[in-house]
Amino acid sequence: MLLAIDAGNTNVVFAVHDGIEWRGRWRIATRADRTSDEYAVWLLTLFQLNGLRAQDIDRCVIGTVVPAALYNLRRLAREWFSVEPLVARAAVDWGFEIRVDRPQEVGADRLLNSLAAHHHYKGPLVVIDFGTATTFDVVAADGAYLGGVIAPGINLSIEALHQAAARLPRIGIGRPQAVVGRDTVSAMQSGVYWGYVGLIEGIVGRIKAEYEEPLKVIATGGLAPLFSEGTTIIQTIDPDITLEGLRLLAERNPAPILTRTQFRDG
């Protein structure tokens, strides 16, 4: 079975695929100082609850945008599952060209999303990921990664608004009943929600104009369903697209070999 690890700025998602389907998905808050033993105690307990064992894992793939977290995630794979993980980075075989000026700077999550989106939906397309940052990534008809747009995530925007304006409260995210708010909270919710809908429609519209061809729009991330309610520009929501990218990447690349030196050094 494959252990896929998607380490984002906010959460680390662990998932197990048995070759046919995903057997489980679990998330924990991202902390760069969390040790491999801490991960193991938490994860192996969840394995037991789902009828899985550490020895069931024969492959591991890691995608991370938090470099400091990689060391202990590697140790987790080596010490607790006895496998050397494949790490998603520009140098591995993606099966497509990365047509940007500095391929090594592109976040692993953006390449993984592009890989899975092209595999499942073909192209050309735009992938919107509602994460800590909101990213828009453009994939050509042949699957090549063409670049994209990075905007502040909605939670970052809400927190910045609260901290910078003394009289504005911290608010939750939701679709307001009306555009014009009749109190402070509803006015803020409207500005955040409809402001982001405008951001989505504006950026996708400009991308389509720049490429002068129809583009499918795929969305992922926890807030994708909420924002798709406010616009018709999003055609498909795929919550597992990053995990699918990890699975497909593992299929394309040979499993790294765990050496005694790696096992000892972690």
Image: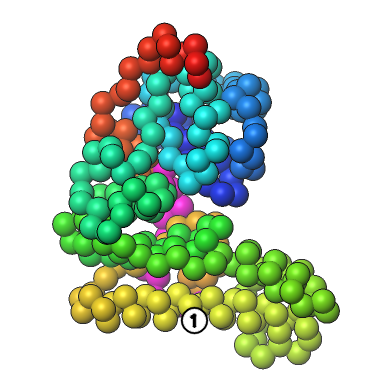
Residue 118 painted magenta = no
Task: State the residue lying farthest toward the right.
Answer: 167
Write the residue at 47% across / 18% down.
78
**Looking at the picture, how far across and down is residue 265, in whole percent?**
50, 16
Residue 226 placement: quadrant: bottom right
**Looking at the picture, how far across and down is residue 85, in whole percent?**
40, 26
Q: Which residues are magenta?
A: 230-243
Residue 141: in sight, yes or no?
yes
**Looking at the picture, how far across and down is residue 249, in whole percent?**
30, 38
Where the N terminus falls, by quadrant?
top left
Q: Nearer the viewer, residue 101 or 188?
A: 101
Write the residue at 67% across / 90% down.
180
Q: Main secondary structure of the magenta part?
A: loop
Left or right position of 91 against 157: left
Residue 46: in sight, yes or no?
no
Say how many tags the image has: 1
Colour convention of the picture: rainbow
Identify the amino acid type marked 1: Gly
Residue 232 painted magenta = yes
Which residue was labeled with disc 1? 198
Q: Is residue 48 above or below residue 145?
A: above
Task: State the residue lying farthest toward the front.
Answer: 102
